[in-house]
Amino acid sequence: MTAAAPAILHVDMDAFYASIEMRDDPSLRGLPVCVGGPAERRGVIAAASYEARAFGVHSAMATAEAKRLCPDLVLLPPDFDRYTRVSREIMAIFRRYTPLVEPLSLDEAFLDVAGSERLFGSAVEIGRRIKEDILRETGLVASVGVAPSKFLAKLASDLDKPDGFRVIAPDEVRTVLDPLPVRKIFGVGPRTAKRLASLGVETVGDLAGRRRADVLREFGASGAWIHDLAHGIDPRRVTPGRVEKSHGLERTFAEDISDREELRLILFEFCEQVSFELRDRGLRGRTVTLKARTAAFKTMTRSRTVDVPLNEGRRIYAVARELLARIPPGPLRLLGIQLSNLSDVRAPVQGGLFGSEAHEADASGISPERRERAAKALDQLRHRFGKGTVVPGSLLGRKFERGSPPRDPGE
């Protein structure tokens, strides 16, 4: 069990998307508010206010089910541009207190404040100041956990939600951990929890009480990890340079789509959106993955890795279109595109011995330099007037609808 003083903070915004909507429209306060896609288009809930959660509504739930549980549900479409702007304000508050900030998503981050205590006071004082700054400057409420490690800090922030502030001191670790269900341990999913239950392990205390060698033999390398966490041991450091591993979009259709030309146009929209967001983040990717789900709920993926990383919509689409052609004919209920194997645009790109298509003029004779300048100019217009301001001619007249980010497999 670690004896380190609490110096790690986990800050998690309460019902972030829904809270922004209620802040900006006070008439929504006190109502069961959700952000998500419409039920008639097979939408899912992205965020639920605590009033909605009282009815059993939660994120990732089908909107149709949420409306069944809560007939008076107030459903709002997501505005990711607005949520991202607020997220940047919050991250800026964190960085006033420490440069060691590791964002996990738009609405949560780890902070290591060990080196800031001489300037701002103890980790507990810094946590309270950050919570107060967020409320005063954004009108939003955060829950804060303070602990000696990342695992414990994240656990602490979740214990007293909403509007929580929880400190786990070294001498409190066993008292806090032991009664918790074993699924509270990061890395213990439903299947692992079921296997543990078959061994008589229901709580974190049960797991901590087992011999490490026995857990390692039963679960392999992951057994060592979950056994350490059961003792509050987590050596992971806060990593400010946490690299985004992938970026993409997917959409569940209101009705299954069989028309391949329509699917190609939707895919082109996605490639344009993803390319803009990659450039906005200063990223490009080498691996293009297409995801498709049939009317029978069979999910298929097709991937291709290219020699030179991409962040231009048309070039991403050229690969994605080939991948779509490898999906068997038939109606699809979901389509998605994802770029992975990401790198910083400032990183040098190794050209091939005989050149590469990414460095050559396209079919119209336009050089890569001119394409890059044109993309920058169009991005400036999109930043100023909105993403739908400039669209390719083939997409004119179509409703420019943003898809949903693919879910993180670890969630």
Image: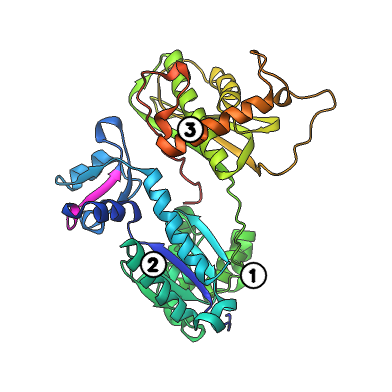
Helix, strand, or loop for circle 3?
helix
Helix, strand, or loop for circle 2?
helix
- In the rendering, which numbered label is found on residue 213? 1
Q: x%, y% of residue 243?
A: 61, 51
Q: Residue at horizontal 63%, vertical 37%?
A: 285
* Residue type pointed to by label 1: Ala
Residue 90 appears left or right of 311: left
Q: Residue at horizontal 25%, vertical 31%?
A: 40
Residue range corresponding to the magenta coloring:
28-35
User: Vertical placement of 50 versus 156: above or below?
Assistant: above
- In the rendering, which numbered label is found on residue 315? none
N-terminal of the pair, mark 1 or mark 2, is: 2
Q: Is residue 33 magenta?
A: yes
Question: Would you name the residue on which mark 2 appears?
Answer: 158
Question: Would you name the residue on which mark 3 appears?
Answer: 273
Q: Quadrant of the N terminus?
A: bottom right
Between 205 and 11, the one lying in front of the other is 11
* Residue type pointed to by label 2: Asp
User: Vertical placement of 66 versus 105: above or below?
Assistant: above
Q: CA distance from mark 1 to mark 3?
A: 49 Å
- Which numbered disc, 3 or 2, marks the residue closer to the eye? 3
Q: Residue at horizontal 50%, vertical 46%?
A: 409
- Asked which quadrant contains residue 304, the reply is top right
Residue 201 appears in the figure: no
Q: Residue furthest left?
A: 72
